[in-house]
Amino acid sequence: MRIDILTILPEMIEGMMHCSILERAQKKGLAEIYLHNLRDYTSNKWKKLDDYPFGGEAGMVLQIEPVDRAISALKEKRTYDEIIYTSPDGEVFNQPMANALSMLPNLMILCGHYKGIDYRIREHLITREISLGDYVLTGGELAAAVFTDAVVRLIPGVLGDEQSALADSFQDGLLAPPVYTRPAEYKGWKVPEVLLSGHQRKIEEWRLQQAHERTALLRPDLLKDYRG
């Protein structure tokens, strides 16, 4: 998988792309992640990327020219399955979306910034708009980093134990059950006996029950779509 991220602040997320799971995926040759500075694509001699919006609204808007130049330059080299714009009014990102995106070979992510981007970019260049949630960030860099991390970790071979990703929260529509490790008792706080029993069927039944209970308590909205 290849992910190209277009941003005015590559330094904001550069470190994240070379740590932990993302670094492992790239070293294994399972993922390629490239950051592209939009300032490299502007014809403005001062590298200015924003301008006032028509109509007099407050705030500044990311101009169409550098974005179009950047996207066009990348599309000359390969075909992209999705060109994603990070936007607070896009589809809310979730695990099924991450699963679907992880199976695509080429993704491009445009990080929103300022008051927004010239709407013509969204009309003519973007194929999908995705949001982290119902709030506004200073820029889309953090959202792009979250999307990248969530997607890349699902690529087969990235995690040491591929079953680990399948047991994550939301994979089956439920929150994950509690997990414990050694010691079995600490300050009088004990690990549930069933997890020490070695009886795998009972352990799986306990995990499913706990997942249901935690979901009903913390995220009851998820249960309406649960088909377990």
Image (cartoon, grey):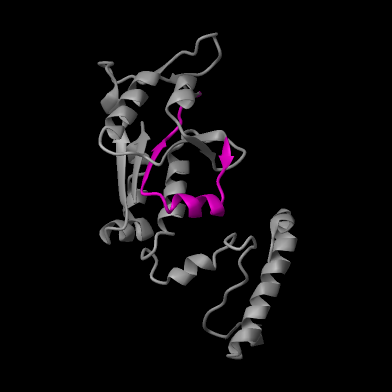
Give the x, y percent position of residue 27: 26, 59
Task: Give 22 or 78, whichever is nearer the viewer.
Answer: 78
- The residue range painted magenta reads 90-115
Which of the 4 image quadrants contains residue 175?
bottom right
Q: Position of residue 74 (x, y in %)?
A: 29, 34
**Front-most of residues 206 and 183:** 206
Magenta-span inclusion, residue 110:
yes
Q: Position of residue 177 (x, y in %)?
A: 63, 70
Instruction: Note whether 147 is above or below 70 in the view shown.
Output: below
Q: Is residue 114 visible?
A: no
| Camera sees residue 104 | yes
Describe residue 42's horizontal placement relative to residue 177 as left or right: left
Residue at the outermost top position: 55
| The C terminus - image quarter | bottom right
Residue occupying the point 28% across, 16% down: 44
All told, the count of numbered labels is 0
Please give left or right for residue 31 compared with residue 87 in the image: left
- Residue 139: x and y, percent? 46, 34
Q: Nearer the viewer, residue 37 or 152?
A: 152
- Residue at horizontal 28 percent and vertical 25 percent from the top: 41
The residue under the point 49% across, 55% down is: 99
Q: Is residue 213 above or below residue 30?
A: below
Q: Is residue 203 above or below residue 173?
A: below
Tell me if 207 is positioned left or right of 102 in this view: right
